[in-house]
Image (tube, rainbow, N blue to C red):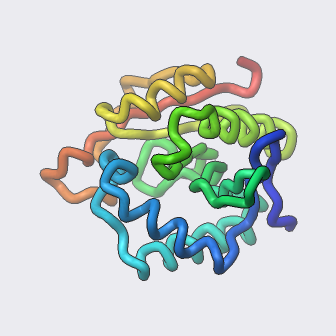
Amino acid sequence: MAEAGPATDRLVLRGWRDADHAPLLALCRDRRVMEFLGPAQTAEDVAAAIARQRAVQAAHGHCFWAMERRADGAMLGFCGLQPGPDGTPIAGRIEIGWRLAVDAWGQGYAREAAQASLDWAWANLDAESVWAITVPANARSRGLMERLGMRRHPDLDFDHPAVPAGSPLRRHITYSIDRHG
């Protein structure tokens, strides 16, 4: 399957390259980026994450794609689609997710990439809905989910099994959007 994801006038969502390791590592070590995601990641963590996304792409034809700005080729973060994590209410469903470098915040890139990912899902997958999760305190992600037209499912709030007990990041909330609105 092709490694290319959707593209917009300003962005290309694409498969992962070895050269993406350094910019992703910088992003995943930034405390502002990781505030609602967990501790800063190591080089090994980032290498494993890229390997996982390559495997998801190979298995499913989509992943959390690397996000590249067309104007200068800068890798801004990632956005895309993958199977929801095991042990969560979205396990086996299509999950949309994103993570951007701080210098890319506030410029509409996340919304643009997320909408392109949703459009790609409706054109290429037979899923009737796309799902997203975040911690309750992550107002930026929640706001984007709502701007995309996603709706919250309070009955599906859960403690994320990959987050240690006692962590303020363990509790998660769930959103979805249906294919037909």
Give the left or right position of residue 179, taking residue 107 as reference: right
* Residue sitting at x 69%, y 75%: 17
Residue 121 spot, x, y in % from top left: 76, 41
* Residue sitting at x 37%, y 64%: 29
Give the left or right position of residue 9, taking residue 133 as reference: right
Give the left or right position of residue 37, taking residue 174 as reference: left
Residue 57 spot, x, y in % from top left: 71, 66
Residue closer to the observer: 128 or 57: 57
* Residue sitting at x 66%, y 38%: 114
In the picture shown, does residue 75 fall above or below 139?
below
Work out which quarter of the rendered image holds the C terminus and state it. Answer: top right
Task: Look at the image and tell me whether residue 126 can be seen.
Answer: no
Where, by quadrant of the figure, is residue 133 drawn? Answer: top left
Task: Look at the image and tell me whether residue 104 can be seen.
Answer: yes
* Residue sitting at x 79%, y 54%: 5
Work out which quarter of the rendered image holds the N terminus and state it. Answer: bottom right
Where, by quadrant of the figure, is residue 45 drawn? Answer: bottom left
Residue 12 spot, x, y in % from top left: 77, 52
